[in-house]
């Protein structure tokens, strides 16, 4: 089971966890990415996430399919938030269930690392005195 | 031919909106389109990367663009 969603409402790690739970799983890895309160010492007021939705969903599917080709991950959930997020809110949840723990760690790390490289989602950090598209410039 | 190009993130700021029209030679490739964009909007040269997506997939350099394709500028992504 692959469950990919872009949502403009709060994400539920509990719901993602329940989606991947199954009798054959001996390990479930749950990654929760949250909005940090500062960047290089500068207080962040909020984040704005924007996605090219159809392609973001298709790229997230590709990641899940790559995981299933490499690890025995029967169930994978990736939920990503879009819109405005306050500090502490959840931006992304990834849940991977595998028979043994090592594969679930590896697959989950692969998912978040690849997501940050390939999935067309952009975040803008809003500071007290300005805003910046994250990672746009070298 | 006239091409409609969609932009996201900082690309939207650079071209001045989520959508722009560009006059390009027929049978232009993704690589040639990128070169034209870098020339027309020099601010793209300051970015870490600029990719082109055609119909929801990253384009290859030699991929030919047709006027009915959905063409999207993908500046450096920063999800997660």
Image: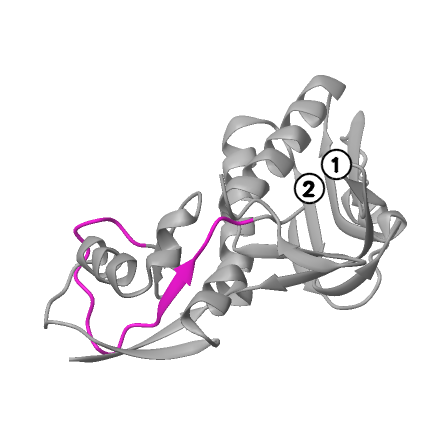
Q: For the point 16% across and 61% down, which residue is it?
A: B64
Residue A46 is at least partly visible in this image: yes
Of marks 1 and 2, which one's residue comes earlier in the chain?
1
Q: Are marks 1 and 2 in contact (CB under 8 Å)?
A: no
Instruction: Describe the element under mark 1 as helix, strand or loop.
Output: loop
Q: Which residue appears at 35% of the width and 66% of the height?
A: B55
In the image, which disc is placed on residue A40? Answer: 1
Q: Provide the secondary structure element on which disc 2 rests.
A: strand
**Residue A10 position (above or below residue A117):** below
Q: Where residue B52 appears, x then y in whole percent?
A: 34, 57
Q: Which residue is mark 2?
A: A75
Q: Quadrant of residue A74?
A: top right
Q: Nearer the viewer, residue A48 or A101?
A: A48
Q: Is residue A62 above or below residue B39?
A: above
> Where residue A88 appears, x then y in whole percent?
89, 49
Q: In the displayed image of the protein, which residue is found farthest to the front?
A: A129
Q: Nearer the viewer, mark 1 or mark 2?
A: 1
Q: Chain of mark 2?
A: A
Is residue B56 visible in the rendered image? The answer is no
Q: Is residue B8 above or below residue A98?
A: below
Task: Give A19 or A118, whichever is nearer the viewer.
Answer: A118
Instruction: Using a 10 Å C-alpha cutoff, classify the residue at mark 1 as few (fewer than 14 neighbours), some (14 to 19) or many (20 or more).
Output: few
Residue A47 vs residue B66, the one in the foreground: A47
Question: Disc 1: which chain?
Answer: A
What x and y, as percent, mark residue A124?
A: 66, 57
Specify start and end residues of the magenta stretch as a single range.
B59-77
Using the image, tell me which numbered label, if any, was put on residue A101.
none
Q: Is residue A131 magenta?
A: no
In the displayed structure image, the side of residue B25 where residue B19 appears, left or right: right
Q: Quadrant of the N terminus of chain B?
A: bottom left
Judge left or right: residue A90 versus residue A132. Answer: right
């Amino acid at each position: 089971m692959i469950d990919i969603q872009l949502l403009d409402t709060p994400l539920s790690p509990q719901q993602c966890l329940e989606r991947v739970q199954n009798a054959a799983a001996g390990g479930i890895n749950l990654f929760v990415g949250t909005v940090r309160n500062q960047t290089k010492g500068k207080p962040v007021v909020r984040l704005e996430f924007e996605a090219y939705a159809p392609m973001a969903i298709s790229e997230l599917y590709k990641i899940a399919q790559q995981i299933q080709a490499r690890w025995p991950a029967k169930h994978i959930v990736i939920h990503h938030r879009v819109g405005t997020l306050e500090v502490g809110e959840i931006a992304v949840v990834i849940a991977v269930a595998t028979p043994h723990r090592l594969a679930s760690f590896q697959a989950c790390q692969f998912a978040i690392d690849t997501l940050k490289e390939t999935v067309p989602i952009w975040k803008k950090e809003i500071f007290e005195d300005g805003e910046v598209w994250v990672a746009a410039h070298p | 031919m006239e091409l409609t190009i969609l932009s996201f993130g900082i690309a939207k700021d650079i071209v001045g909106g989520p959508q722009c029209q560009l006059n390009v030679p027929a049978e232009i490739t993704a690589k040639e389109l990128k070169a034209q964009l870098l020339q027309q909007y020099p601010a793209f040269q300051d970015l870490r990367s600029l990719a082109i997506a055609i119909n929801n997939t990253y384009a290859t350099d030699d991929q030919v663009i047709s006027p009915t394709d959905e063409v999207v500028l993908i500046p450096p992504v920063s999800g997660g």
